[in-house]
Image (cartoon, rainbow, N blue to C red):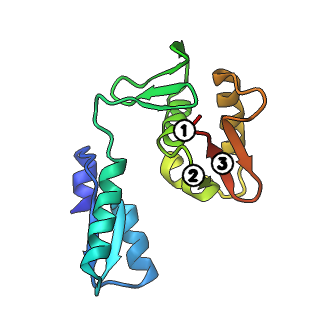
Amino acid sequence: MARRLREQEHTFPILMLTARAETQDVVSGFDAGADDYLRKPFEIPELLSRIRALLKRVDRPDAGLKASGVEVEPSSRRATVKGELIDLTAKEFDLLHYLVANAGRVISRDEILEEVWGGQHATDSNVIEVFVCHLRNKIGDRDNTIIQTIRGVGYFFARG
């Protein structure tokens, strides 16, 4: 069902509640389009907490996201730095949007590969580094204070 909803381009959060607890079941759930996966038995407070977390991450279609002077507008796929429009490729926009949406927390390389590239690159690929370098140049982050590299882990986008 989740796969069909995503194929129909529904973007609302999907939380799978299931008794299937094997790792492959969890992976299949996420691959099908789930945003979170909760195995039975579970406690109601945990369920409510996960629902609240999912709802925090939902972008209103017209809402822009802001951090460190960078604003991304998902509905128009436009990005600005201090009010100036920047020219981005589709994948650069996707990466910048993901980084800004997760500003203030460390994001692992694996998470970025999965969320931005759909897991279609090998984990030893340098595709992320190349795109981060392009973004740093385009947003004027010459001293790497906005997009910080966390060695051996991933990246941190400053809230600024």
Q: Local crowd at mark 3 within 10 Å, few (<14), some, or many (≥20)?
A: many
Q: Report which residue position mark 1 lands on.
A: 95
Residue 12 image offset from top left, x and y in percent: 25, 49
Image quadrant containing the N terminus: bottom left
Foreground disc of the pair 2, 1 = 2
Dot 3 amino acid type: Tyr
Residue 8 image offset from top left, x and y in percent: 22, 46
Q: Nearer the viewer, residue 158 or 92?
A: 158
Q: Secondary structure at mark 3?
A: strand
Q: Secondary structure at mark 2?
A: loop
Q: Local crowd at mark 1 within 10 Å, few (<14), some, or many (≥20)?
A: many
Q: Report which residue position mark 3 lands on.
A: 155
**Which residue is found at the position 77% from the left and 54% from the top?**
151
Foreground disc of the pair 3, 1 = 3
Q: Report which residue position mark 2 lands on.
A: 105
Q: Secondary structure at mark 1?
A: helix
Residue 49, picture quadrant: bottom left
**Which residue is found at the position 28% from the left and 85% from the top?**
19
Cβ atoms under marks 3 and 2 closer than 8 Å: no
Residue 77 image offset from top left, x and y in percent: 41, 25
